[in-house]
Amino acid sequence: MKIINNFIENKKFEILQENITGVHFPWYLQNGVNYNKDGYFQFTHNFIINEKTVSDFIIILKPIFNILEAKKLIRVKLNLLNKTEKIIEHGFHIDTDQGINCTTGILYLNTNNGYTKFKDNTVISSEENKFIEFNSNTEHTGTSCTDKDYRIVLNLNYYK
């Protein structure tokens, strides 16, 4: 696993935050976090699904793509989870189909007391502009947060 603090230049990161939390950025309700109707909900914005660009807003991610230098982007999406009374872990999963050996990256868009937890009990705190990278077959779970109104992460799956 690789952890990079201050992943994007501060000014570019602030512009990214302003774009995705602005009134003109579209968020879509998902009835489930890890799978459909799992008892939870989240808001998402898909940029790339199955290697195809599906959002006109993808341009805001250019600074990230420039740093990643990925050979191929498989899936790129934002996840927004609302504040909860207690931290909820949403269950271990992998982001891609079983057997696809690519890389998963998570960029934290805001600092909060939520986290990403791995099956080996490694816990990575949600701190804005922190990027983590790991093999896509590594089981992990995200959480809600209790100290901010929401937790936002950018989830990327790609070939290096």
Image: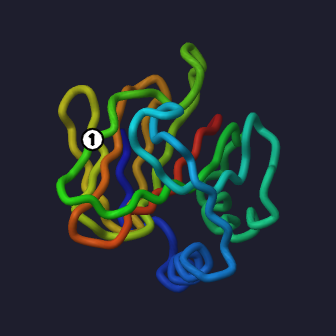
Q: Quadrant of residue 29?
A: bottom right
Q: Residue at x 60, y 60 (%)?
A: 67
Q: In the image, is residue 68 above or below residue 57? A: above
Residue 46 place in picture, x, y as percent? 67, 51
Looking at the picture, which amino acid does disc 1 mark? Glu
Disc 1 target residue: 89
Q: Residue at x 56, y 82 (%)?
A: 18
Foreground of the two, 149 or 114: 149
Residue 76 place in picture, x, y as percent? 64, 48
Foreground of the two, 10 or 31: 31
Q: In the image, is residue 82 above or below residue 98? A: below
Left or right position of 15 against 130: right
Q: Quadrant of the C terminus?
A: top right
Q: Quadrant of the N terminus?
A: top left
| Numbered disc 1: secondary structure | loop
Q: Residue at x 18, y 33 (%)?
A: 121
Q: Which residue is drawn at 31% across and 65% down?
A: 127
Left or right position of 148 against 52: left
Q: In which quarter of the image is residue 60?
A: bottom right
Foreground of the two, 88 or 47: 88
Q: In the image, is residue 121 above or below residue 25? A: above
Residue sticking out furthest to the top: 99
Residue 38 place in picture, x, y as percent? 42, 33
Give the total number of marks visible in the rendering: 1
Residue 12 place in picture, x, y as percent? 57, 80
